[in-house]
Image (cartoon, grey):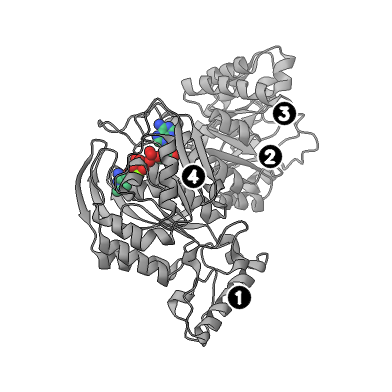
Amino acid sequence: MGYYCSQVLSTSFSIPKNCSRLSSPEVSPQGFHQSRVLSYPSANSRIHQATRFVAMQEESALTSATTNDHYKMKVPHVLTVAGSDSGAGAGIQADLKACAARGVYCSTVITAVTAQNTVGVQGVNIVPDDFVAEQLKSVLSDMRVDVVKTGMLPSIGIVKVLHQSLKEFPVRAFVVDPVMVSTSGDILAGPSILAGFREELLHMADIVTPNLKEASALLGGMQLETVGDMRSAAKSIHDMGPRNVLVKGGDLPASLDAVDVFFDGENFYELCSSRIKTRNTHGTGCSLASCIAAELAKGSPMLSAVKVAKRYVETALDYSKDIFIGNGLQGPFDHLLKLKNNVSSSCRQRAFDPSDLFLYAVTDSGMNKKWGRSITDAVKAAIEGGATIIQIREKDAETRNFLEAAKACLEICHSCGVPLLINDRIDIALACDADGVHVGQSDMPVRIVRTLLGPEKIIGVSCKTPEQAQQAWIDGADYIGCGGVYPTNTKQNNLTVGLEGLKTVGLASKLPVVAIGGIGFSNAESVMEIGVPNLKGVAVVSALFDRECVLTETQKLHSVLMETASMIK
Ligand SMILES: Nc1ncnc2c1ncn2[C@@H]1O[C@H](COP(=O)(O)OP(=O)(O)OP(=O)(O)O)[C@@H](O)[C@H]1O
Ligand SMILES: Cc1ncc(CO)c(N)n1
Ligand SMILES: [Mg+2]
């Protein structure tokens, strides 16, 4: 599959730049037809030889995947050639977000800068043809682009420049969104561009995605009002040369489902989704085309790419149907499906403060059961007694019960400004939006936990050696838990590191440390006094929860820790 380029060495042949990206059947993804854009314009045989050589090197780079590190780094790549929308709902900005949402790299050639918002388009500044050509060359000559997708092409000169560039630098697939009029009714590309589309681009396109107005314009003003009309239009546009046509029905009467008609030259497909009741449909067309391009770049066959793209737009519209940005008639939607949740979570989540580790309470379901208390009562009492952070450790609970308990505890913790971590279970932490997790050496690796939880969440990891502490720091943890300091009943077969081990690991650790294992109010002082600046507190299970009154025990431990802290100062 074509991704970012692994090294393809140039040879003693003089290889023209247009040969450096030949797609050979061997490297094409399965089920992906070769586009006409791909066909290498036959030149003299020496060039041909050179091209084959390059293709062979590419192929061998792909087949030696296990030994070639570059291969692991390759990502599918879409280049969008489109206009900038200052309101960021459509155009280049929508394309970047849609590709990011679909996990695909997106480079950008800007054809025009629009002053635009949710009210309409207030101004358009067209980029000169030769500067569009320069951008195209910069990207296509250097970065291995899989799919080119077009949006606003505001001048016939730009259309010609693009045609030329694609001949010079063939790509695997070409997606044309024939943008003409914004939904606010503003002209983005005049009628003169229609001839450009017909003569220069459509015959190169793997798919063209007009909305109702654009399909009508391409067909000289034909009225399009029904799904039947859309079928006829798709067929007539197909006759202009593109391999596939998608006539989008976003502008059909609002009472109808959102129906798009796909035609591949042989079969028609009516792609239906529910029509989401929302004002936030600005940029749906750009996003749909970008998502199609992204899926093609990953190697999907065309019809699957279109179906995934339609599902993506529908999901994103539904997810963000109630967000409100701008005061105009048509707002942008949330491509990353994040805004809605983050509004609340970004208010809640506060940055990790190492002093949170001061009195770290770790719940134990068995102990709470034994003493006949609920987990939420245990958490409430610990916080009231002075706990500065809570970790929920439910080894035996069923997932659904664990999640419910975690949600309830999170509410209590947040109402008191105390962070809540989940032991081991990344899925539970994600599902309830906890403040973070604590993992052991045999749980999910910290690096992967960080990727799953994102940059803000707190990650702690249990470490017994300086090497593990170093690795935790490299992998992006926020703190380490070091122990067992003393023998404990909560963990069977757990090697005790003692105060000496704690000191060795603590001094080596670049991260804040919390001591754990058999610690209570009678020995907390000797732990905190070992002279390790990074030691920020003690984590406690039995000494708080395997007792009748959690509140009293936490208060006792809290006062010992406070006294010790004032002595150390
Ligand atoms: N309210 C809606 N609910 C569900 N899907 C929708 C809705 N509105 C549009 N779509 C879908 O979004 C995609 C884009 O279609 P649309 O006809 O809106 O494109 P467009 O007019 O080019 O968009 P824009 O110019 O705003 O970027 C299509 O798949 C269409 O069916
Ligand atoms: C820049 C730009 N491209 C495309 C569209 C179509 O939605 C738009 N409104 N603005
Ligand atoms: Mg459109």
Callout 2 touching callout 1 (CB < 8 Å) = no
User: In x, y percent, where is residue 216?
Assistant: 33, 44
Residue at the image position 54 percent from the left and 40 percent from the top: 453
> Which mark, by number, is residue 262?
4
Q: Circles 1 and 4: CB distance less than 8 Å? A: no
**Disc 1 residue type?**
Met
Give the answer, above or below, for where 86 lies relative to 316: below
Q: Which residue is mark 3?
A: 395
Tell which residue pokes out farthest to the right in this image: 493
| 155 on left or right of 494 | left
Q: Nearer the viewer, residue 316 or 398?
A: 316
Residue 380 in picture, x, y percent from top left: 56, 17
Q: Please determine whether, in this image, residue 394 is positioned above or below residue 193.
A: above
Q: Are marks 4 and 3 in contact (CB under 8 Å)?
A: no
Q: Quadrant of the N terminus?
A: bottom right
User: Mark number for residue 483?
Assistant: 2
Q: Which residue is mark 1?
A: 56
- Residue 438 lies, in percent from the top left, at 62, 37
Whole-angstrom CA distance, mark 2 to mark 4, is 62 Å
Residue located at (27% from left, 31% from top): 329
Mark 3 or mark 1: which comes first in sequence? 1
Residue 174 seen: yes
Q: Residue flagged by tag 3: what amino acid is it?
A: Lys
Alpha carbon of mark 3 to alpha carbon of mark 1: how far? 54 Å
Nearer the N terminus, badge 4 or badge 3? 4
Q: Earlier in the sequence, mark 2 or mark 1?
A: 1
Q: Is residue 383 left or right of residue 115?
A: right
